[in-house]
Image (tube, rainbow, N blue to C red):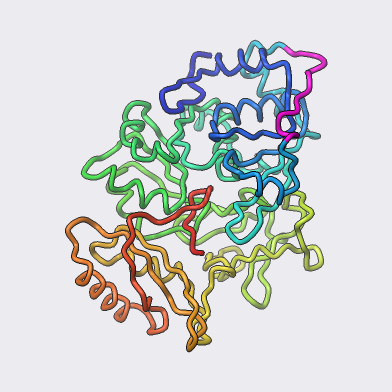
Amino acid sequence: MNKIFLVYKQMEVTYENLINDINAKETYQHYIFVNDNNPYSIFLSIIHSLLYKYPIEILDGDFSDIELEEIGVNKTALSDSKSIERLLTINDFNVLLDKISENEDWSLSLYTSGTTGRPKKVTHTFQSLTRNVKTGDKFSDNIWAFAYNPTHIAGLQVFFQSLMNQNTIVYAFNDQLTNLSNLIEEYNITNISATSTYYRNVLPYLKDREYDSIKRITFGGEKYDPSIEDKLKTIFPNVKIRNIYASTEAGSLFVAKGEKFIVPHTIKGLVKINENNELLIHQSLLGKSNSFTFEGNWFNTGDLVEFIDNIHFKFISRNSDMINVGGYKVNPLEVENTLINVEGVIDLVVKSKKNKVTGEILVADVVKGDNYNDMELKKSIKQYGAKHLQEWKIPRIIKFVNEIPKSRTGKKVRK
């Protein structure tokens, strides 16, 4: 059991260490609230709760007192702990895996990212969180770069996929992003799952090199950006790339090669679109939440999609992301995916600004490359936009910034 479970900064934790820490943990807490979102503390608590079958609620470690109050959590309750009445002794990882896999009554509650309002609590079972976990010999040697917040659904998906195959997890989120190149080489990482924003931000640190160990790259947590794919294939010559559709409400549901998602035959009758091209999911596929509202038995995801045929669809944008410019609905993702192709543009976010004439106008915050003149690059962006976009989709204001603000989950912040 000396196989590494987790690499976090300068710390390496083996599966033997993990089991020893589980055996030594004699108390438990309902709330998992780790100030620095230390992934080991979070993962240890999740596994312990599965073993002893008690419900847990995961909170972001950087929730402020006001945010905790808004979601109804009493701060004094965060430190409440109880003793385990009957301690178990685990000597083998497979025994641990068997015990946590037979779990029917356990539940885990987590919160939406809150990018469109107050975070909402959603409760999942072990079955709903591991619905699409794949196990077997072909997955046993995977080594995962962990590039998500461990308190959110995308991070939990990677955690369970790794745990159920006794894989190694290498933490590569936040301040470890710039160290990804060294981590890949030191630990022979094979799999990366991250947002489009993460890949764009990490590319400058992976330049002019090839990494043969990477076999699989997954896009998730954000709309897939096709402009990045060729760059990633150059850096990772042996890679296969997949795109995952998942949400806090439902967990992981669909997989795509590129932008073309397929609806699995097992849930074909549980997915549809309404007259506004919004994706609806049957309530049987969801976790539990008091915040859900249903249209009959259907949950409106707020995602705009385009069905290509009976089983394939393309994600367009979040309904809440659409910007009304003089009566025209503009998808900021379309504008970003177009203007990212301008030479000198490293990254950008398109958002709205109130305007007396058109209601809203488009503003682009742009991260530019070194040695590019501001005025010349603005001119290039405008010219490229005029050639490839309709007139109302061209940003009226272009500002250069050092970085694009991101949410707790690593997504771009448009507000």
Question: Residue drawn 32% across and 43% down?
Answer: 236
Number of marks in the rendered image: 0
In the image, residue 375 sits, relative to residue 50, either above or below, namely below
Q: Quadrant of residue 64?
A: top right
Question: Residue drawn 35% across and 46% down?
Answer: 202
Give 267 or 408, whichever is nearer the viewer. 408
Give 321 or 371, whichever is nearer the viewer. 371
Question: Residue drawn 55% across and 14% down?
Answer: 16
Coordinates of residue 17 in the picture (x, y in percent): 55, 15
The boundaries of the magenta stretch are 76-88
Coordinates of residue 112 in the picture (x, y in percent): 64, 51
Coordinates of residue 156 in the picture (x, y in percent): 59, 39
- The residue lying furthest to the bottom in this view is 357
Question: Residue drawn 37% across and 65% down?
Answer: 365
Coordinates of residue 218 in the picture (x, y in percent): 46, 47
In the image, residue 139 sits, relative to residue 63, either above or below, namely above
In the image, residue 150 sits, relative to residue 122, either above or below, namely above
Q: In which quarter of the image is residue 307?
A: bottom right
Give 275 or 181, whichever is nearer the viewer. 181
Residue 179 lies in the magenta stretch: no
**Would residue 251 appear left or right of 6 to someone viewing this image?**
right
Residue 81 lies in the magenta stretch: yes
In the image, residue 358 sits, relative to residue 71, either above or below, namely below
Give 3 or 385, whichever is nearer the viewer. 385
